[in-house]
Image (spheres, coloured by chain):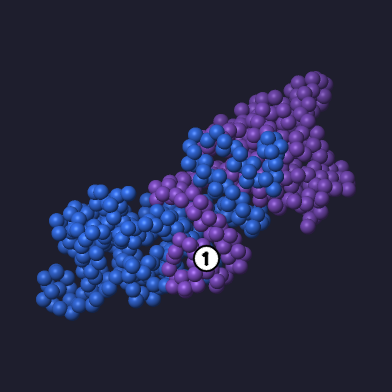
Chain colours: A purple, B blue
Amino acid sequence: MIDQIRSGYFTEEDSAEVVTSRNSAAKDERLKQVMDSVTRHLHAVVKEVEPTQDEWMQAIKFLTETGHKCDDWRQEFILLSDVLGVSMLVDAINNRKTGGATETTVLGPFHSEDSPNMEMGSNICLDGKGEPLVVHGVVKTVDGLPIENARLDVWQANDEGFYDMQQKGIQPEFNLRGVFQTEDTGDYWFSGVKPKYYGIPDDGPVGAMLDKLGRDPNRPAHLHFIVTADGFEDITTHIFVPDDPYIHSDAVFGVKESLLADFIKVDDPARASELNVGNPFWEVTFDFTMAPKR
Amino acid sequence: MIDQIRSGYFTEEDSAEVVTSRNSAAKDERLKQVMDSVTRHLHAVVKEVEPTQDEWMQAIKFLTETGHKCDDWRQEFILLSDVLGVSMLVDAINNRKTGGATETTVLGPFHSEDSPNMEMGSNICLDGKGEPLVVHGVVKTVDGLPIENARLDVWQANDEGFYDMQQKGIQPEFNLRGVFQTEDTGDYWFSGVKPKYYGIPDDGPVGAMLDKLGRDPNRPAHLHFIVTADGFEDITTHIFVPDDPYIHSDAVFGVKESLLADFIKVDDPARASELNVGNPFWEVTFDFTMAPKR
C-alpha cells in the first residue's frame, strides 16, 4: 500500500488511502478532516453499490440538475439534505444539550433574510385567506425569567400549503412572514392563518427521487420560528399541529414531541373583535425557553 | 428503535434507520439499495465530523456553486468525482477483469459527443501549434487478430494544456478532436501535438477546495481515447507521457503502469514529409486490445 501511495497510482483496494494521502499539506486542517471522512465514506458507498458507468453518470446528472434547480427562491440541496435526514442530524448534533431550552428542528428552504419588522400583535396574513389563528406566549430564560427584546422571526405556508416565494404574483410579497420583538414582559403575540400540511416541492430532482423511493412528500402543518436574543443560544424551530394526518411521516423528519402545540378552536365574537381577527378563530399558546449562550 | 421508527420521529442514535425505513415501498429497488447505502454513509460522515450549522451551510453552498458552474462546456461534478478518486474507483470496479484487454481510466470532463469523423491519417491539430506528434498502432482482439471498423474517438489538450472547449474563440472549434475508423488490418494512425501537463480548471469550487487541501491540481500529459467495436467491450482510456513531472501525482488518479507509452523524438525530414508533419516530430506506437462483449 505504501508503494502504491508513493507511486501515486490508484488501486481499488487502497482507493481512499491513495486519495486522502494527497491532503497531507492541507492549509485548512478542518477541511482536511471533513474531506478525509467524506472520501472514505464515498468510496465505501461505491464499493457497496458497485455502480455501473451509466449509474455513475446518472448520479452526476442528478447532482447537476439539483444545482441548476437552485436560485434565490429555491434551495434544492437543502431540500435534499432535509429529505435524507441530514439536516435533522446536524440539528440534533448541534443541540444535544438544550439545558431545558425549547428544542430545535430544521430551517427548511423557505426562510427569507428580508422579512419585515412588525408591530407586536400584527397579522402576518396579508390576503385574509384561510382560518384565522392567534399565536401567543412568553420568551423566557430556563429559570423562567422574561426575556426583553427577543427577536422572533416567523414564517408559515398559507391555508393551501404554499409559501409566498412559491406563489410569487399570487400571494402578496412577504405574506405570512414577520419579525417581532418582545417587550419587557417577554410576551409575544401575532395573528396568522391555521397552517395546513403540504407536499415539499416535487417538480425537481429531489421530488422525482422521492417518488421512485415510494416516499410520501408531505410535511405536517407547522409554523416556523427563529428566536434570538443577546446572550442566549439561537432557537430555529417549528410548532406543529398535533392531529395532522402526516405528523408521524414528516418528509423531512422535523417533528419532535415537545414541539406539538395545542391548537384550540375559539368561538367568541367579543374576543375575536378585541384581537382583530375573524370569528371563529384558532388559538395557540407556546412559550419559548432560551438557554444562555455556550 | 422500532417505536421510534413507528412514530416517524427522528433521533440522533437511529437517524439512518428512521430515514431508510421510509423506502420500504420503493418503486425502484436499485435506487432503494443505492440510497440506503448513501444515507447510512452520509449520516456516518455527519456523526464523525460533527459539522456546525455554519459548516453544513458551507457544504450546501459548495454543492450549489458546483452545480451552477456546470454548463454545456464545463462539468464541475465530474471534476469533483475525479479529484476525489470516485471516477477511478467506478472505473476500477467496472473493469476488474480486462481479460488481457487494454486497461481503462477516467473519461474526464472534456469529452465531446460531436467530434468530427476524420480520414485515417488526418492531423487533428487544426492550428499547427506545438511539437508535431504521430500516433499509430493496431486495434486487435485478445488473440491478436486485427479488428476492422473499430472506432477511435480521440481528444487531447493543446501544447499549453488547454482543451478547445476551454478556449472557445482562441482555439479552432473541434481542435485536437477526431473520430477514426480502422481498416481491415486494424491499423490506425493520425497526427496531433505533443501533449503537455496541465492544471485542472481551478476557477470553480473544486479548484478552491484543492487549494485549501494543499493539493497539486496538475495532470500529467496524456491523450484520451474511447475505442469501440461491435461485439467488444468499450475502452475509455488515456495514453500517458511517462517522463512527465506529474506522472506520480495525477490530480485525478488516472495513471496506470500499462498506459505509459513511449514518446520517441524523430529527426527524419523524409519521413516527416511522408507523414505530412513538421520535422522533428514525436512518434508513439500504441496498440489497443479489445475483449469480447461480456
Residue type highlighted by circle 1: Glu
Please give the name of the residue rendered at 51% of the width and 57% of the height, measured from the top-left corner.
A43
* Residue A283 in sight in this render: yes
Whole-percent x and y of residue A41?
55, 56
Task: Specify few, some or many for label 1: CA neighbours under 10 Å numbering under 14, 14-19, or 20 or more.
Answer: some
The residue labelled by disc 1 is A17
* In the image: residue B257, left or right of residue B205: left
Residue B99 vertical position relative to residue A7 in the rendered view, above or below: above
* In the image: residue B118, left or right of residue A245: left
Quadrant (top left, top right, bottom left, bottom right) of the C terminus of chain A:
bottom right
Whole-percent x and y of residue B79?
44, 58
Q: Which is nearer the eye, B235 or B273? A: B235
Quadrant of the image occupied by residue A184? top right
SS of the residue under disc 1: helix
Whole-percent x and y of residue B294?
32, 49
* In the image: residue A241, left or right of residue B27: right
* Residue B65 in sight in this render: no
Please give the name of the residue rendered at 29% of the width and 49% of the height, measured from the top-left corner.
B293
Residue B107 vertical position relative to residue B274 in the rendered view, above or below: above
Chain name for mark 1:
A
Q: Which is nearer the eye, A71 or B117? A: B117
Q: How many marks?
A: 1
Please give the name of the residue rendered at 27% of the width and 57% of the height, measured from the top-left corner.
B290
Q: Which is nearer the eye, B174 or A115? A: B174
Q: Which is nearer the eye, B169 or B201? A: B201
